[in-house]
Amino acid sequence: MAGHNKWSTIKNKKGKEDAKRGKVFTKIARMIIVAVKEGGTDPEYNPALKTAIEKAKAENMPNDNIDRAIKKAAGDADSDNFEEIVYEGYGPEGTAVMVSCLTDNRNRTASEIRHAFDKFGGNLGQNGSVSYMFNRKGLLLIDGEDLDEETVMMAALDAGAEDFSAEDGVYEVITEVESFSDVRDQLKDEGYEFIKAELYYLPSNYNTIQSEDNKINMEKMIDILDDNDDVQEVYHNWDNQDE
């Protein structure tokens, strides 16, 4: 199976510090608002909203916060209108980076993203400059503790998963975008709980950074991007074996 899919290269740091939890909730609320405005308030008929709600629950976001975001989007036509923008560029030593944003101010966000790249030895590129190095896939992560690997693998493949791998006690299930919801729902019905369940940009190959200074700069760049309220996710192809 997909031995090249490294959980250590795509895991993010949200939830590790209480100080960051508020930012995580803010980002998920934006995700919910956009999903409601595009597809309505019923998660059974709105896959994007269903995914956003599951992500919120995985982050222990209070139900009141979830309901408030849904009601705000449904009932306030003048509420903030967020647009989705994906920025592409290079980090230190040519590492490919994609930054997914939801913003109500395109100029502000572009300036802040560019500053983060420039400050730590990267450069912001044009649309298409690195996206060809990534594949849009569905990603399901399952905590492997107390679960038999072969049993989980067979359940995932029977549900229609494209690929399966295990690393560091985490089972990684990869799906095509079109089958993501079906695979997720079938595994959920079978009792599996997810650490992460969302559409993702997965790198088709990985880049190793040689210089210790550049490794530090790459870490700092990812951190400052993650800390930006407009940034939903940071994807990269850095193979950080030290993480």
Image (cartoon, rainbow, N blue to C red):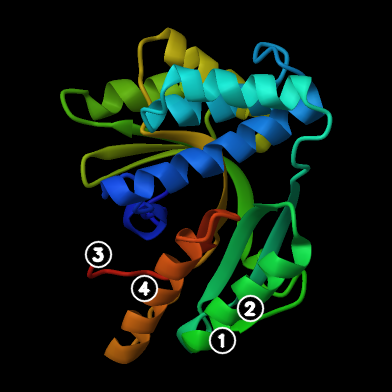
Sequence-wise first label, 2 or 4? 2
Image quadrant containing the C terminus? bottom left
- Counting from the top left corner in percent of width and height, residue 180 is at 60, 29
- Counting from the top left corner in percent of width and height, residue 66 is at 53, 23
| The disc label shown at residue 219, or none | 4
Camera-side residue of 2 and 117 = 117
Residue that badge 1 annotates: 118
Q: Considering the numbered disc 4 on the image, is that residue within a helix, a strand or a loop?
A: helix
Q: Considering the numbered disc 3 on the image, is that residue within a helix, a strand or a loop?
A: loop
- Counting from the top left corner in percent of width and height, residue 222 is at 44, 68
Residue that badge 2 annotates: 114
Sequence-wise first label, 3 or 4? 4
Camera-side residue of 53 and 197 = 53
Give the residue type at disc 3: Glu
Question: In the rendered view, does 25 fall on the left or right side of 240?
Answer: right
48 vs 136: above or below:
above
Task: Answer yes or no: is residue 159 visible.
Answer: no
> Are the residues at dot 1 and dot 2 in contact (C-beta closer than 8 Å)?
yes
215 vs 203: above or below:
below
Of badges 3 and 2, nearer the viewer stands 2
Residue that badge 3 annotates: 243
Q: Residues within 10 Å of mark 3 (few under 14, many from 20)?
A: few
